[in-house]
Amino acid sequence: MHITILDGHALNPGDLSWKALEELGSLTVYPRTKPEEVIERIGSSDAILINKINITEAILEACPQVKYIGVQATGYNVVDIEACKKHGVTVTNVPAYSTAAVAQLTFAFMSEAACRTKLHSDSVLQGDWTRCPDFCYWKTPLAELEGKTLGIFGYGNIGRRVAQIAQAYGMKVIVCTRTQKPDIPNPVDFDTLLSQSDILTLHAPLTAQTSGIINRSSIAKMKKSAWIINTARGAFVNEADICDALTQGNLAFYAADVVSQEPMAKDCPLLKAPKDKILITPHIAWAAIETRKRLLEVVVQNLRAWTEGKSQNVVS
């Protein structure tokens, strides 16, 4: 079996081993692949592994020998699933591997919004504390997470983990989700989630219904002191509306690990937002080495299961 990885640098920039995949067949690894290089690089491959490479029906038609696509991520919107079904191609993904890491970054954002550690550390290192006549100082209002109402939109693995951590902080948790489950703490409808949340954190799947759900209209229903945390998908929010709300004082803080176009476009509206009211990281929630090791292990398990005629994490 010939296996080709088209964008290996995303998962493994050099700190992990491909050995387990090499044991399953002849392995070719490309760190990065341009769209115009995809068909040529797939070549005679039976199985391809991707992270963010788009696989279209045209590619499948040009490479009819491909029978397996392993997405090295949870989201698989980069693959034309209907075309894969038509051409008999099995597609797998890796669910739930990043639960702990995404929840961790969610609270890193909240903690930074509450404590402003970077702002104050930069100030100290610039000599401001040395020049200060008082034993301490703060440059902006600070806050406690305890007692805050945390609104969670989406209650899958990550939303559930966030709720558990929030309860340890002493926060009040309310949840809005499309599927009703008996263990959901304080379930509410979407409008109630907006109006009651001191902090709104997004953890739902991106669908036609949820795309752009955070916009000028929904922000108007929130407290002006509210924060929004987005570690899910950039397309959940209208970025221009977020920028306007921050600028006009209708939203206090926005933090995100995702944007609508990645890498971030030069004209992304979020670049114009007030810098003291926004945090953006470059989609790093999954990047911890422990998280990527877990991801790679499941990628290998998925492919091995397919070679043995078994189904594991199949999405096509």
Image (cartoon, rainbow, N blue to C red):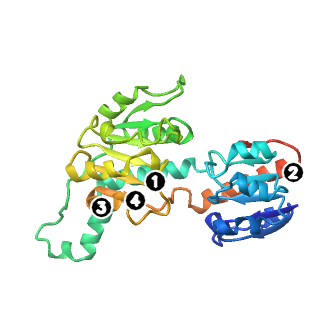
Badge 4 marks a residue whose secondary structure is: strand
Could you tell me the amino acid type at mark 2?
Answer: Thr
Q: Which residue is mark 4?
A: 280
Q: Amino acid at mark 4?
A: Ile
Whether residue 218 can be seen here: yes
Residue lying furthest left? 133
Three-letter code for the amino acid on which mark 1 is drawn? Ser
Distance from disc 2 to disc 3, alpha carbons, whole Å, reads 50 Å
Between the C-alphas of marks 4 and 3, the distance is 12 Å
Where residue 139 sits in the image (x, y, percent)? 19, 62
| Circle nearer the viewer, 2 or 1 | 1
For marks 4 and 2, the one nearer the N-term is 4
* Residue position for label 3: 272
The x and y percentages for residue 305 are 83, 48
Near-viewer residue (86 or 303): 86
- Whichever of callouts 1 and 4 sits on the residue coming sooner in the sequence is 1
* Disc 1 element: loop
Q: CA distance from mark 2 to mark 1?
A: 36 Å
Numbered label attached to residue 260: 1
